[in-house]
Structure formats: structure tokens, C-alpha cells
Amino acid sequence: MKKPLRRVLTVTAGAILVGSGVAWYAILGRTRIIDLAPNLFVLHTSSFGRPIGGNVTVLVGDTTLLVFDTELSPLTTRLKRLISTRSRLPIQTIINSHWHPDHNGGNERLRAPGTELVAHPSVRDRLASGSEGFGLTRPGSHHRFDRRGEDALPTVLVEDSLIRQFGRDRIVVHYAPGAHTGGDLWAVIPEAGVVLLGDIVWPGSFPFVDTHSGGTAPGLLAALQHIMDVVPGKITAVPGHGLPLDRPSLAAYLGMLASTLASVTNHRQAGHTLEETQEAGLPEYAAWASRLTPTDEWIRMIYETVGESSLPPSADSNGRTEPAEGVAIKELDGPH
Ligand SMILES: [Zn+2]
């Protein structure tokens, strides 16, 4: 089928499903298992080659499972079924990389009595009280997320690092201050050389930095640099969205981050306004622009956060910030 026709069919079917109140991605999306090792796999959902929601990684231990991120809630039934095709062991640990709902939507239903739920304290805060999301689907978008029930809330709060043993595999969880959000966790399984990135890296495009919830461009760069420093040798890195990456791909991504941050910093230090900096653009990196983070947005994310400490001054100790005054509320629909 030719691509434009595919797109028309996808959009039409999506519109019908949205109109009927059904999550279109739960019907049209295809979820496949990507094996990283005999006891380690990723559940990756996509529709016509585009990722849907977030990746879910499962580590199988001797007697229990660990799950890193839990996707959008309408996909939970499918996740449970696919996990059970590989292992029927109980889930001992769920880790949420951050508060965005495409990474924790399945918390309630994947969790069992005794399951620990690991996240940064600001994630618990946001899930418990409800939250506003800005730019999560495209520049200027706004979503309001209701507060979640007790079953969805983290029980083990990580402000620095945490170690768990699953069978012969050790997993080390790290906090990355002020990166994609103000409450990002990433993890490494050192013996397997596998890194679970959350949304610190966006394969093939500029990253999305949630500047409304404590994310900063320098923090994102520092997080990726730290990951590459502490994980020597070969790496298989699972991003929050998209397919796994190797070390050379991460190095290229790091190079793009460093160059674009340097360029925008130079403009800012030269006294150029944000608009002037956007006018100059990032011509060498035009191919990295995406619908979620076009070049102007990436420049804004850098310009507003570069040169500051790991968290913006307006963030409280949990990395929360109030929405900027005057932010337009344009829509209230679900996350993608
Ligand atoms: Zn995210």
C-alpha cells in the first residue's frame, strides 16, 4: 500500500474510533516483542512505523519480574497478555521513568499485592494530585490529567539511585536531575550492557524537554553524557519511544545535543533575543526537526534553560513548576 493512502486510512479509521470513544491506538497499533537477551525483552507498539505510547521493558528473574515503564492505560490488557506468553512469574518491581502518562498508564492494573512501584518523588506528587501537561503532543498542546488512585502511586521514591537483583542480573536505577522532566529515572543492567533511557533520548529527532515540569536542555545533555561515562563498552539503549540504539547512535545524539546547545548559548550570550536566535535557526541540524519538537521549539527549550542550574529557579524541591502565565489552553485530548 502506498504511504499517502495508508495515512488517509489511518487518519480516517482513527477519527471513527476517536468519535466512538475507543482509543484508536489500542485497535490500530501493533505491539511486538523485541528480545534483548534470553531473560530481557521490550514491548514496542507502533502503527505504520510510528511508535505509539512508550516502550515497556521486562526483566525476568528467577522468581519474579521487573517492568520498566507501563505505557498508556488502554494497552494494559495487551501488555499483560504478551508478558504472560514469556513468563507467568509475578511482577515484583515496576519502575516509572517519569510522570508522563505514556510511561505509567498501566501502573494500577499491572501491579499486584506486594509489587513495589519505583519513581522519583515528584512523580508520586504529580500522579497523586493530578497534573497539567504542556506540549506533550505538539507545540502549544495542553492536557489535564486527573489524579490517579492509590494503586497507581509510587511506593519507593528514588532521589539518587537504587539497586535491585533479579536472578543473575543487577539493575541500577539513577536519577537524572532536570533532564526530560524534573523527575527522570534511567536504569542500567551492567552485565548485559543494557540501558533503559526513558525519554532522555528521542531517536532521530530533537528531544522533547518538558520545561513546564522541570526539564532542562543542559540537564538532558548531562544525563546522556553521564550514561555514556558510567556504561563502558557496548551498549543497547532502549529509548522511551522508538527502537533500541547502540553506542555509536548515542554518541551521534550526544554530538547533536552538544552542538545545538553551544549554538543557542552563543546567541544568548551575544545578547540575541529568542526570536533572533530562532530566526538564525540550526541549519546543519534541520533533519532532526520533528512534529513534536520543531527547530523553533528545540531552540526555545535550550534558550530558556541553558546556563541555569539543574532545575529552573521556579521549580520547587520536587521539580514542579507552575504553568507559565498566559499559556494558551487550546485543547483537552488524550496523550499520544
Ligand atoms: Zn515523556
Image (cartoon, rainbow, N blue to C red):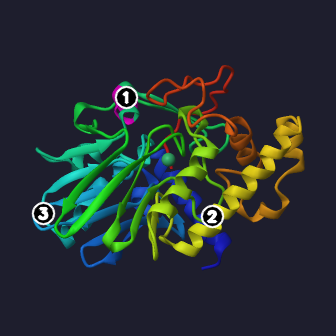
Secondary structure category for the residue under label 1: helix
Mark 2: amino acid: Tyr
**Cα distance, mark 3 to mark 1?**
30 Å
**Cα distance, mark 2 to mark 1?**
31 Å
Write down the region rendered in magenta. 123-128
Q: Residue at x 53, y 40 (%)?
A: 178
Placement of 16 over or under 178, stated as above or below? below
**Cα distance, mark 3 to mark 2?**
37 Å
Placement of 125 over or under 281, stated as above or below? above
Mark 1: amino acid: Asp
Asked if the stretch drawn in magenta spans residue 125, the answer is yes
Instruction: Give the numbered dot on residue 125.
Output: 1
Residue 39 placement (x, y as % from top left): 24, 73
Placement of 138 over or under 206, stated as above or below? above
Residue 214 placement (x, y as % from top left): 54, 34
Q: Would you name the residue on which mark 2 appears?
A: 253
Residue 95 placement (x, y as % from top left): 31, 50
Neighbor class of circle 1 (other Cα within 10 Å; few <14, some 14-19, many 20+) is: some
Q: Residue at x 44, y 28 (%)?
A: 318
Kindly indicate whether the residue at mark 2 contacts the one at mark 3 (C-beta within 8 angstroms). no
Instruction: Give the numbered dot on residue 89.
Output: 3
Q: Nearer the viewer, residue 186 or 48?
A: 186
Neighbor class of circle 2 (other Cα within 10 Å; few <14, some 14-19, many 20+) is: many
Q: Compare marks 3 and 2 and give the one earlier in the sequence.
A: 3
Q: Nearer the viewer, residue 187 or 329?
A: 187
Mark 3: amino acid: Leu
